[in-house]
Amino acid sequence: MPYILLALGILFALVALNAHVPPRNAILLAPGFFCAWLTIEMAPHVLVTWGLVTALVAVLGGLDGWAGWVGLVLAILGMAGVAATLVASRRTVVTLRDCGAPLDLDPEGAPRYPLAHLIVPQLCLIPRRGVRVERNIVFHEEGGLRLKLDVFRPAGERSSGELRPGLMQIHGGAWVIGDKREQGLPLLNHMALQEWVGFNVNYRLSPRATWPEHLIDLKRFVAWYKEHAEEYGADPDFLCVTGGSAGGHLTAMVALTANVPEFQPGFEDADTTVQGAVPFYGVYNFFEAGPWPRPMGATRILERMVVKQPFAENREAYAKASPVTYIDKDAPPFFVIHGSRDSLIPVAEARRFVERLRGVSDAPVIYAEMKGAQHGFDVFPSYRTARVIEGVERYLTGLHRQYRQGSGPAVPGEVTESLATGPSMGEGAVG
């Protein structure tokens, strides 16, 4: 038993270290990410499990030798390291770079994400009470292609009959995997309870699909939304878009390439503008190095499976697939979110995108850098996820209020109020 406790202690210590300093080695990158992701975002569950296992082994004789005591010390150090990630997530705030002040994502009186979903994450897969979900609605059909979406909306109708704002959710998965059933569920459920209508949208995946077919499918949804939104109680003239990872890249592309004919073959005249974008941990530049030793476009997955063109001879094709190429003064408002410990898409990628966007766009650009957060942190309904979801709801609700009043775009009042009253802790982004 002492050596079992020693082995557990070494394992716990290494896992905790990986959560704080994930490996950059190509071979260890994927397993290191998944281990860090689960450890950080499921920290309460990890701590309880580790504590119970350590106590059980100790009671069964794990402390009967020097190896057991060393293992106990290492296990305690490992649990302390995981606890540190939990403390950081519970103190989550956002910094608005333009004024250098923190945005409190836990403001008094704001809609709250349910505590039960933090304790039992599987609950986020179940539609919340007061939310009606309609699944597998076909929004485009052509030959053997049938693109589907799920709709999340309040269970009741508005007494005034007023149309609700719409939110488009784009799943991630490196453009090759993923599905509408797997991502964005905590946000969509919460937004539906705040009188929004959410659309979780599928699109063609590589290697079967070749860029820009992924984007074309999503633009078909935007065109479909303009025609069918009222059938679901949504306002056809107000749609925001969000998504994470590859979905973050596609979110930015949808927002920045409104009405670009190249991405709307056969429906060039359709209006594909959106009123706001909230990309999570996205890739925004395929053709320039920076966060990586070489450009993202030169990676095997993009060259062989997504764009399917050699980067060196087709740099322009990768520039056309990059959101930074389409930045202009008419870009819609952006709320860019990224984790400071993202080991798949380094946080520097978000920083340089935000800097370029702010240098050109007339609309406000808010940047949230979540201290201690890994890639895909919002998939689980953790404490950090709850705060971010509540903050995104306040931001988008503010944009919708400005739209109804005919004002803006500007930083929503919900955000400026939090800036005036939020804590002054250094947990957010300075940008």
Image (cartoon, rainbow, N blue to C red):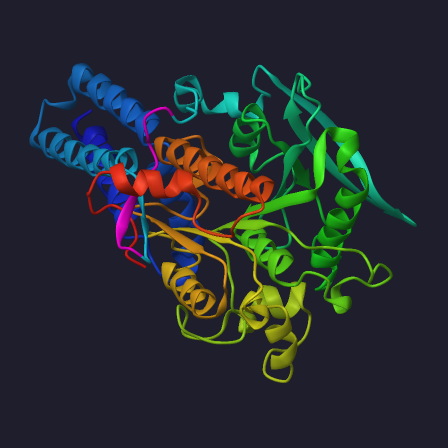
| Residue 350 location, quadrant | bottom left
State the residue lying farthest toward the right. Answer: 143
In the displayed structure, does residue 354 sit left or right of residue 63?
right
Magenta segment includes 100: yes
Q: Is residue 328 magenta?
A: no
- Asked whether 281 or 223 is in front, the reply is 223
Q: Going 30% across and 43% down the picture, which residue do you hit?
A: 419
- Nearer-the-camera pick, 188 or 203: 188
Q: Is residue 170 visible?
A: no
Which residue sits at x=71%, y=64%? 212
Above or below, 208 relative to 200: below
Residue 329 lies, in percent from the top left, at 54, 68
Q: Is residue 234 left or right of residue 388?
A: right
Q: Which residues are magenta?
A: 99-109
For the image shown, how many numbered marks are present on the structure?
Answer: 0
- Which is the main secondary structure of the residues drawn in magenta? loop
Q: Is residue 318 visible?
A: yes
Residue 60 vertical placement versus 362 (above, below): above
Residue nearest the observer in this picture, 169 or 210 = 169
Residue 54's image quarter? top left
Measured as percent of width and height from the top left, residue 130 is found at 59, 16
Check the picture and name the quadrant holding the C terminus: bottom left
Question: Hey, which residue is sitting farthest left in the picture?
Answer: 66
Side (left or right) of 350 relative to 316: left
